[in-house]
Image (tube, rainbow, N blue to C red):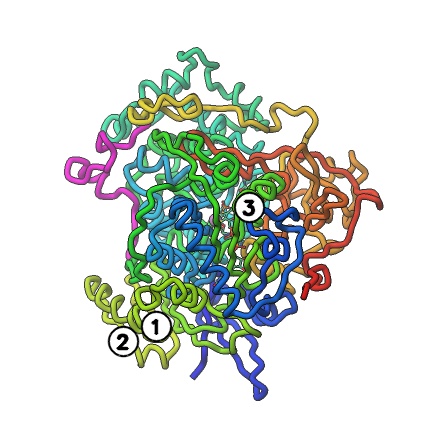
């Protein structure tokens, strides 16, 4: 029987040779597999694996008061027994001296795809049994949307995603898909929790065959795959709201919007319209006004407005739009525009948020809420919106706004992280590195010697999905996979479950934490519980043994068409939305009652804090989008990602006009800089990116060179700003960043060290 492994980027067959060496092959049922995933086996055995527990030397000497900064220190190898004793003791001391709220275990991150070994579930279960912890809420992906969607359409983000018109509904009915932020195919390679068959490309192709036309409104031409043949409208980053407002203006002036839809299904249009027409002490949102902001010719804007209302139109927005200053606005405005077009609730139109952001959006199978690891209850109420971590560490006790509430930052003494990497995901890393020095103790479970491990005090070596048994049980994917352990744990690494069991043992709650179950017993438990849940959906999962032997199970999928808000459209009385008015809120009394300066009662244009409309020192807008050859920082150490580098640096795309002005040529090592930091990258001249914009994807392992005061590998988060989207959502704003770029001089260049095991001095 074949063995399989499921990952966030796909399912693979595991081959084993006579010497027990393993390699991966594409799963034959996945017609659009992800290449970079094949190199998991290589990364799982490379020299960057953490072989055993380590403790930072300065911390061991003088706990909490080390005079050497985290990130600059060396590490002492330790036995499991000793390191677990030390960590358990620190946890207990912190709990007794400062209380559980002084422990931050928000532990954001994608970790690995298995349901049982899901690191954050393990963290939550452990700390809930330990009396609770300060937690995090929201995601870096769509925090602004998570906050505003319930106010305007009465749905949480995940339900919104599940409601999306399916590809098979769109392909027969949609005439025009207007894609704000494009639909980058590379992003649909992944889905959190695992992918069976990649379906997005097929969905898009169906639409092309069905005659849908596409318009890609984005700073980057290749945000739309070539086969869509999209018309490209280059837009200045972060100005989509202004463009959409001007489209609304044209529809209002021409009296051509769908008044019936507005009256029947929405509230607050008049107040919004008054704003659009400039009757609220603001400039009217004319095409001329928007053209100045967006840099799109007036004629193009007028032409676009005409197309919108003469076709069955889907307004598609990428998640990236709201990872930006005032990120709530483009989403709210896009939904408002879709209301004015009047096709919400029909098969061919409406709005979408995140088609092709990950694999599952637009799929049509039944979503089943599979059983997950029971986590218990967190007795500590303190939490932060996830992207406010640096603020929290810098300003204990200070209050901040969030979704109409005033909250207080807890005073954090101990940080525990497993399955995420803030030195990948967080903005303004130089500021994070400083704030990261505040807690007394930082404990991290990590697989590789990336920056996350190198900035910890106690490092527990975690193993990879290849070294464990698990289930891929993703509610957003119809394939279930038996992840069978295919290699022994690398060196002295352990699973997060084993690590937390070891800590729980020392803290006196091992049997509560483990429930006296081993790995396989947990997996069987999850299967049996899920089997019961499946019955409610008239699905009979096979016996566990049979499933495990077979290696995967495909949940039957009726090819039904899904239409967002169909019931609401057909019968708004009986199927009202869960908003205060029961309708779509173009103006929201709730948000108005918060009295915020940065999020008004209806969609509005706010100048971003940095943008191309107001440049001084820094003249280029940096887009740090998702990487093509890896998942965030994961597998950056493997061959696909390494091969894509230029002179060992992350490639930065720059338009030849901007490059020529600065005498930058292909393959040059360049320096990107602003007031927040300096980064080296490798130049690629490209006409795909509009003039004024450069693209440096996220995920190059953070590699600061403190002598040069420069990050030498190409991590964009040294340059991005760390402020919330607004006091409503407090989401991250990585896509709002101005920089300058120049060819780096010899003196400004140093080698990339992060992949070099010699750069890490094991200090015995
Ligand atoms: N500039 C910029 N920054 C961004 C973004 C952007 O667009 N631009 N996007 C943001 C978004 S949307 C996201 S979701 C975040 C993603 O940020 P993260 O999810 O934090 O990034 P990953 O690199 O996936 O981090 C996962 C870490 O977990 C480790 N790991 C994997 N499996 C396991 C396991 O089983 N156990 C343990 N203990 N560890 C494990 C991996 O080695 C890796 O270091 O980044 C955000 N940051
Ligand atoms: N291969 C791969 N796929 C991934 C991931 C990965 O790491 N690797 N990460 C996954 C994760 S965690 C997430 S959250 C999703 C994210 O999905 P998205 O948020 O959609 O992804 P991004 O790549 O950040 O942005 C998509 C495009 O939006 C455009 N864009 C940026 N700002 C603006 C703007 O202001 N206006 C307009 N019109 N366009 C703009 C950029 O040109 C960019 O290429 O991707 C997922 N998919
Ligand atoms: Mo994300």
| Quadrant in the rendering for residue 573 | top left
Vertical order, 536 against 134 (above or below): below
Which percent across, then down, holds residue 472? 39, 66
Circle 3/circle 1 CB separation < 8 Å: no
Which residue is located at x 30 percent, y 62 percent?
370
Q: Indicate the quadrant containing the C terminus: top left, top right, bottom left or bottom right.
A: bottom right
The residue that disc 3 covers is 223
Q: Are marks 1 and 2 in contact (CB under 8 Å)?
A: yes
Q: Which of 137 and 139 is in front in this view?
A: 137
Residue, disc 2: 542
* Residue 193 makes an appearance in the image: yes
Question: Secondary structure of the magenta portion, mostly?
Answer: loop
Q: Name the residue under label 1.
A: 553
| Spatial CA span between label 1 and label 2 | 8 Å
The Cα–Cα distance between marks 3 and 2, rounded to whole angstroms, is: 41 Å
In which image quadrant can residue 346 be found?
A: top left
Q: Which residue is drawn at 32% across and 61% down?
A: 372
> Which residues lie in the magenta part?
559-586
Spatial distance from mark 3 to mark 1, Cα to Cα?
A: 34 Å
């Amino acid at each position: 029987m074949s063995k399989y492994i499921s990952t966030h980027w796909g399912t693979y067959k595991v081959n084993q040779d006579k010497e027990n060496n393993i390699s991966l092959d594409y799963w034959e049922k996945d017609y659009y597999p992800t290449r970079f995933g094949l190199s998991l086996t290589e990364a799982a055995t490379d020299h960057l694996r953490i072989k055993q527990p380590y403790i930072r030397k300065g911390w061991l000497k003088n706990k909490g008061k080390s005079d050497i900064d985290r990130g600059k220190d060396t590490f002492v190898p330790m036995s499991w027994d000793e390191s677990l004793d030390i960590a358990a003791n620190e946890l207990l001391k912190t709990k007794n001296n400062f209380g559980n709220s002084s422990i931050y275990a928000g532990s954001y991150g994608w970790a690995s795809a298995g349901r049982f070994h899901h690191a954050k579930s393990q963290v939550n279960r452990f700390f809930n049994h330990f009396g609770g912890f300060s937690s995090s809420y929201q995601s870096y992906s769509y925090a602004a949307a998570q906050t505003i969607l319930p106010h305007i359409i009465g749905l949480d983000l995940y339900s919104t995603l599940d409601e999306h018109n399916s590809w098979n509904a769109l392909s027969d009915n949609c005439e025009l898909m207007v894609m704000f932020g494009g639909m980058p195919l590379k992003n649909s390679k992944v889905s959190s929790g695992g992918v069976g068959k990649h379906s997005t490309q097929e969905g898009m192709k169906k639409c092309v065959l069905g005659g849908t036309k596409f318009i890609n409104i984005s700073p980057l031409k290749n945000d739309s795959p070539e086969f869509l043949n999209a018309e490209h409208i280059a837009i200045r980053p972060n100005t989509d709201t202004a463009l959409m407002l001007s489209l609304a203006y044209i529809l209002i002036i021409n009296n051509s919007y769908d008044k019936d839809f507005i009256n029947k299904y929405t509230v607050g249009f008049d107040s919004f319209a008054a704003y659009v027409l400039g009757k609220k002490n603001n400039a009217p949102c004319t095409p001329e006004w928007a053209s100045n902001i967006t840099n799109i010719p007036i004629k193009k804007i007028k032409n676009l407005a005409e197309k919108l209302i003469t076709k069955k139109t889907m307004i598609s927005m990428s998640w990236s739009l709201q990872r930006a200053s005032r990120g709530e606005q483009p989403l709210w405005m896009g939904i408002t525009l879709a209301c004015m077009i009047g096709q919400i609730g029909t098969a061919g139109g409406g709005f979408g948020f995140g088609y092709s952001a990950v694999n599952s959006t637009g799929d049509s199978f039944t979503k089943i809420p599979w059983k997950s690891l029971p986590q218990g209850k967190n007795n500590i109420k303190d939490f932060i919106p996830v992207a406010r971590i640096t603020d929290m560490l810098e300003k204990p006790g200070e209050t901040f706004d969030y979704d109409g509430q005033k909250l207080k930052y807890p005073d954090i003494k101990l940080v525990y992280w497993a399955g995420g990497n803030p030195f990948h995901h967080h903005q303004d890393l130089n500021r994070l590195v400083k704030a990261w020095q505040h807690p007394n103790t930082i404990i991290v479970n990590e697989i590789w010697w990336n920056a996350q491990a190198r900035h910890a005090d106690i490092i527990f070596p975690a193993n990879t999905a290849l070294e464990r048994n698990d289930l891929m049980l993703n509610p957003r994917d119809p394939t279930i996979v038996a992840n069978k352990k295919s290699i022994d744990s690398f060196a002295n690494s352990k699973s997060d479950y084993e690590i937390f069991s070891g800590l729980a043992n020392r803290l006196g709650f091992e049997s509560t934490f483990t429930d006296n179950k081993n790995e396989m017993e947990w997996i069987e438990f999850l299967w049996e519980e899920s089997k019961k849940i499946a019955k409610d959906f008239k699905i009979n999962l096979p016996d566990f043994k049979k499933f495990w032997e077979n290696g995967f199970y495909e949940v039957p999928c009726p090819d039904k068409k899904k239409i967002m808000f169909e019931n609401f459209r057909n019968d708004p009385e009986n199927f009202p939305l869960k908003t205060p008015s029961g309708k779509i809120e173009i103006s929201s009394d709730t948000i108005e009652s918060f009295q915020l300066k940065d999020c008004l009662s209806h969609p509005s244009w706010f100048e971003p804090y940095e943008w191309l409309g107001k440049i001084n020192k820094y003249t280029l807008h940096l887009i740090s989008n998702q990487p093509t050859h890896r998942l965030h920082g994961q597998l950056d150490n493997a061959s696909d990602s390494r091969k894509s580098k230029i002179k060992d640096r992350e490639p930065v795309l720059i338009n030849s006009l901007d490059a020529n002005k600065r005498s930058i040529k292909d393959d040059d090592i360049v320096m990107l800089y602003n007031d927040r930091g300096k980064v080296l990258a490798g130049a690629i001249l490209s006409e795909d990116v509009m003039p004024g914009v450069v693209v440096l994807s996220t995920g190059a392992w953070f590699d600061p060179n403190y002598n040069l005061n420069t990050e030498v590998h190409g991590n964009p988060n040294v340059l991005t700003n760390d402020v919330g989207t607004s006091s409503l959502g407090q989401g991250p704003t990585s896509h709002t960043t101005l920089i300058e770029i120049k060819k780096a001089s010899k003196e400004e260049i140093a080698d990339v060290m992060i992949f070099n095991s010699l750069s890490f001095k094991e200090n015995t």
